[in-house]
Amino acid sequence: MRDRNWWLLVAASGALLVIAGAFGAHALEGRLTPRLLAAFETGVRYQAWHTLAMLGVLAWRAAMPLPGQRLVLGLWALGIALFSGSLYALALSGLGRLGLITPLGGLAMIGGWLALGACVLRVRTATRD
């Protein structure tokens, strides 16, 4: 199976985001300040969107493998780890300095979207929209 490890990573990310979402909604409510709970929920939301986006790129790659798609996947995976991971750690530990990592994850996510655009621009099609 092509991209087996990427598919496994997306599956794990999907499972973890459901667990994190349920944990945040049921176990953390009332135990964290509203600000820390909001940070945790932001991590879940961004992980969800980027996990779905990775799923889309994997499906696209199965139909039309292109240079740069792995870069997109890698940047989004790094972004999830740094952005969402730092927000989860910040919310659970209360260590504010963990928030210094969050923008690095955001930059990786942005880089993934820009790399996606570059992949699309490189596609040569017979018809133009």
Image (cartoon, rainbow, N blue to C red):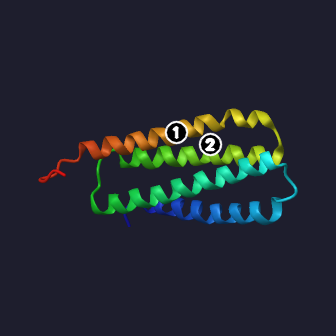
User: Residue 42 location, x and y as percent?
Assistant: 66, 50
Q: Horizontal placement of 111 versus 68: left or right?
A: right
Q: Is residue 25 above or below residue 47?
A: below
Disc 2 target residue = 82
Image point (69%, 32%), residue name: 100
Q: Is residue 66 above or below residue 107?
A: below
Q: Tell which circle, 1 or 2, labels the residue nearer the N-terminal end.
A: 2
Q: Is residue 33 above or below residue 60?
A: above
The image quadrant that residue 56 belongs to is bottom left
Q: Horizontal placement of 83 versus 126: left or right?
A: right
* Residue kind at label 2, given as amino acid type: Leu
Q: Are marks 1 and 2 in contact (CB under 8 Å)?
A: yes
The kind of secondary structure element at disc 2 is helix
User: Residue 34 location, x and y as percent?
Assistant: 81, 49
User: Residue 19 location, x and y as percent?
Assistant: 69, 65
Q: Horizontal placement of 109 versus 25: left or right?
A: left
Neighbourhood count class around disc 1 (C-alpha, 10 Å): few under 14, some 14–19, many 20 upward: many
In the image as oriented, which residue stretches furthest toward the right?
A: 31
User: Residue 87 location, x and y as percent?
Assistant: 70, 45
Image point (63%, 61%), residue name: 17
Q: Of 2 and 46, which appears nearest the observer?
A: 46
Q: Horizontal placement of 49 versus 26: left or right?
A: left
Disc 1 target residue = 108
